[in-house]
Image (tube, rainbow, N blue to C red):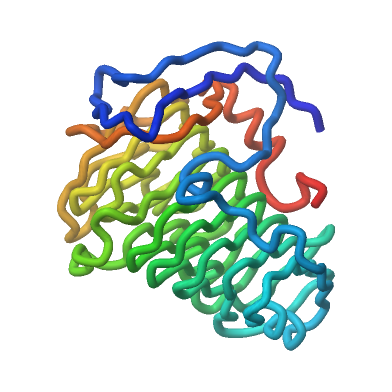
Amino acid sequence: MRVVRRRLTLLTSAATVALLTAGALTGVTAQANPTATADYGLYGWATQNGGTSGGGNAPTTTVTSASALTTALGSTSAAVIRVSGTISCSGMLRVRSNKTILGNSGATISGCGFNINGDRNVIIRNLTFRGWNDDAINVQESATNIWIDHNTFTGGYDGAVDIKRGSDFITVSWNRVYNHDKSMLLGHSDDNGSQDRGHLRVTYHHNWFDASTQRHPRVRFGNPVHVYNNYYYNNSGYGVASTMGAGVLVEGNYFENVKDPYHLGEGSSGPGTLVARNNHFVNSGGGQTGGSVAGIPYGAPIDSASSVKSIVTAGAGAGKISV
């Protein structure tokens, strides 16, 4: 589907160390492009640290069973893995480095999740995860350069996408979460600062948090975490929480029927900082901000917030791209 939209380009450089404050974005220039179209390319933190290419041009394997999927994911060789049909499984399947995991039309992972444990350079796209009994996607132990894109998550036990234990350089984009409680956790424990500080840099953009309850995301320690152009709809808990000294930039998002769009601190976790700019609110609260956030070192297309609902509902989730 061709979606015509207005695009704002965020321009920074790796050398920029300007801080974002509640009233200004130092060192950044915005440019309008009224003829831009929907762009499903890779942006954000996963473009840094050498970039994220997954299996690249490695041989493609198509899997239709849990055993075949487990073997393909666990191989130490680079691979492009195509999932076909519904695969029923349990527990967490280990995903090793240099993998591209793509869902064919209607591909579903039912009952289990993927665990990226200290590995790097992984792409997961166009899958539906349902009914998982741990996490749907768990990224941990200093895993780096991960792109989680155009997936659908529904009806699971714990996190849809949880990122923790020093992991870094990750983009979570164009996903849909519905009929689910705890969506996306970034940083698992208040006591893990020694491993997490200086890491947990993640970009969340163009995700559809569709009546999911909370953690969109809930952030500890990571700075800067970039949350832009997401559509928040009927979230009964909250949108974004910045805690434990994290720094979160929340910009260009669309909040509809969300009483608590974003705040500082959560539960027993102390506050982080949060800068909000150019968000759009419909029947929603105003949110809580405070402090400053480290500079964003990459360029990214930022849509006008008022257009985000139509753009994201048209493009987010499995089945919206051909891979």
**Res 295 → quadrant:** top left
| Residue at the spot 45% in from the left edge and 66% down from the top edge | 143
Q: Where residue 107 appears, x then y in whole percent?
A: 78, 65
Left/right placement of residue 210 relative to residue 30 reads right
Residue at x-position 70% and y-position 64%: 101
For this view, does 108 lie left or right of residue 218? right
Q: Is residue 264 placed above or below 30 in the rendered structure? A: below
Q: Nearer the viewer, residue 306 or 163?
A: 163
Q: Residue furthest bottom?
A: 67
- Residue 270 visible to the viewer: yes
Above-or-below relation of 9 to 67: above
Quarter occupied by the N terminus:
top right
Q: Position of residue 151 (x, y in %)?
A: 65, 55
- Residue 273, picture quadrant: top left
Q: Compared with residue 32, is residue 266 higher up or lower down, i.e. above or below?
A: below
User: Who's the residue at 62% across and 17% down the image?
Assistant: 6
The percent coordinates of residue 104 (x first, y second) are 82, 61
Residue at image position (51%, 50%) is 50
- Residue 302 drawn above or below residue 263: above
Could you tell me if residue 210 is visible in this image? no
Residue 263 sits in quarter? top left
Residue 77 pos. (x, y %): 67, 76
